[in-house]
């Protein structure tokens, strides 16, 4: 299986460990085999070990080590935020976050919605069963 | 990033005597884990260079030196003198890092792992920021590529915090990138 996601200048990665967990960062330069210079909208440009990064499919077009303004412009031009939030991975993370932040009343509402949905599905199933057996 | 080795600028001179009212002032930049050790190192080196000891000298200033541009990558060349089991040797090593303290720390750990040299047997002679053209080592020169691109071959699967670590997992991990 060939590799599809490469470490390169402009690759978007997700931080999977440490203080900046869950952030989307741009790989801005490669320091050496294990570390990259990494930058995001709300952090100071710093180094990060590749072990803390999970590469995504998104890549933006920037030169090596751009300044913050150019970086933000490139991020907006490539529409990274929307691409991420509409991708299946991004959507899953949003759902996880929502579920983790529910309060008891929300969980009650979800329970009712689930029961309702299951009831509608079961009705349709019963209808289809009736058609096939008769 | 907290580094073990900090860079200090230490300034000292011999005490003024009747024959020498204004002795020469000497300044050294050196690496130590803390200020106390830095002062001690200063006298150690100065004793070897000039006829002055801590007992007949005075410390004028000691300041920590911080990295000017910790957000840019630089190639550091480090000249060092170390003591091996058989004698003293000189060495030149190159490191790519964002800060000089980071490069020095890489040097200490690499000397310990490759040559079993502990940090007190290493003396840093000189450090310099080397422009990319003048780097000598292939391992630093291979990163001097503006279109650098490589895949991460092996994905390390680990929980996002130490708290979520468990001995047993329900399924085998997926190691493909």
Image (cartoon, helix red, strand yellow):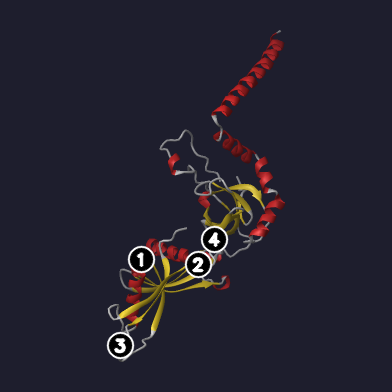
Instruction: Write down the residue under mark 3.
Output: B17
Which circle's residue, 3 or 2, is located before the other in the chain?
3
- Could you tell me which residue is drawn at 36 percent across and 66 percent down? B119
Reading the image, the residue beneath label 1 is B119
Task: Find out whether the residues at labels 4 and 2 contact each other: C-beta distance under 8 Å.
Answer: no
Q: Tell whether label 1 touches label 4 (CB within 8 Å).
A: no
Label 2, secondary structure: give it: loop
Figure check: B169 above or below B64: above
Contact (Cβ within 8 Å) of mark 2 with mark 1:
no
Picture coordinates of residue B89 (x, y %)? 37, 73
Query: Which residue position is annotated with label 4?
Result: A31
Q: Is residue B107 left or right of residue A5?
A: left
- Marks 4 and 2, how far apart in space? 17 Å
Nearer to the camera, A114 or B156:
A114
In the image, which disc is placed on residue B67? 2
Q: Earlier in the sequence, mark 2 or mark 1?
A: 2
Which image quarter is the N terminus of chain A in? Answer: top right
Q: CA distance from mark 3 to mark 4?
A: 52 Å
Location of residue A106 (image quadrant): top right
The CA distance from mark 4 to mark 1 is 24 Å
- Give the chain of mark 1: B
Q: Residues within 10 Å of mark 2 (few under 14, many from 20)?
A: few
Q: Residues within 10 Å of mark 4 (few under 14, many from 20)?
A: many
| Image location (x, y in percent) of residue B176 | 55, 44
Q: Subunit of mark 4?
A: A
Q: Are marks 4 and 1 on the same chain?
A: no
Q: Are marks 3 and 4 on the same chain?
A: no
């Amino acid at each position: 299986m060939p590799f599809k996601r490469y470490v390169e200048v402009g690759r978007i990665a997700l931080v999977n460990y440490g203080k900046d967990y869950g952030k989307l960062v741009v790989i801005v330069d490669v320091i050496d085999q294990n570390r990259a210079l990494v930058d995001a909208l709300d952090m100071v440009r710093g180094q990060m070990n590749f072990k803390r990064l999970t590469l995504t499919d998104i890549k933006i077009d920037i030169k090596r080590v751009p300044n913050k303004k150019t970086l933000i412009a490139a991020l907006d031009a490539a529409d990274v935020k929307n691409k991420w939030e509409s991708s299946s991975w991004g959507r899953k993370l949003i759902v996880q976050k929502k579920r983790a932040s529910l309060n008891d009343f929300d969980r009650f509402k979800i329970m009712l919605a689930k029961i309702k949905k299951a009831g509608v599905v079961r009705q349709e199933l019963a209808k289809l069963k009736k058609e096939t057996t008769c | 990033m907290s580094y073990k080795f900090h860079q200090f600028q230490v300034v000292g001179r011999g005490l003024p005597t009747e024959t020498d009212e204004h002795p020469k002032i000497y300044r050294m930049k050196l690496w130590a884990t803390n200020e106390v050790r830095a002062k001690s190192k200063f006298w150690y080196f100065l004793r070897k260079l000039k006829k002055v000891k801590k007992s007949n000298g005075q410390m004028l200033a000691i300041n920590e030196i911080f990295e000017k541009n910790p957000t840019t990558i630089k190639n550091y060349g480090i000249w060092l003198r170390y003591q091996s089991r058989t004698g003293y040797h000189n060495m030149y090593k190159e490191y790519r890092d964002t800060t000089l303290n980071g490069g020095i720390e890489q040097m200490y750990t690499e000397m310990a792992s490759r040559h079993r040299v502990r940090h007190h047997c290493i003396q840093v002679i000189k450090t310099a920021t080397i422009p990319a053209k003048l780097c000598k080592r292939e391992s630093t020169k291979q990163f001097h590529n503006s279109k650098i691109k490589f895949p991460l071959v092996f994905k390390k699967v680990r929980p996002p915090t130490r708290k979520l670590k468990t001995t047993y997992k329900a399924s085998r991990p997926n190691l493909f990138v």
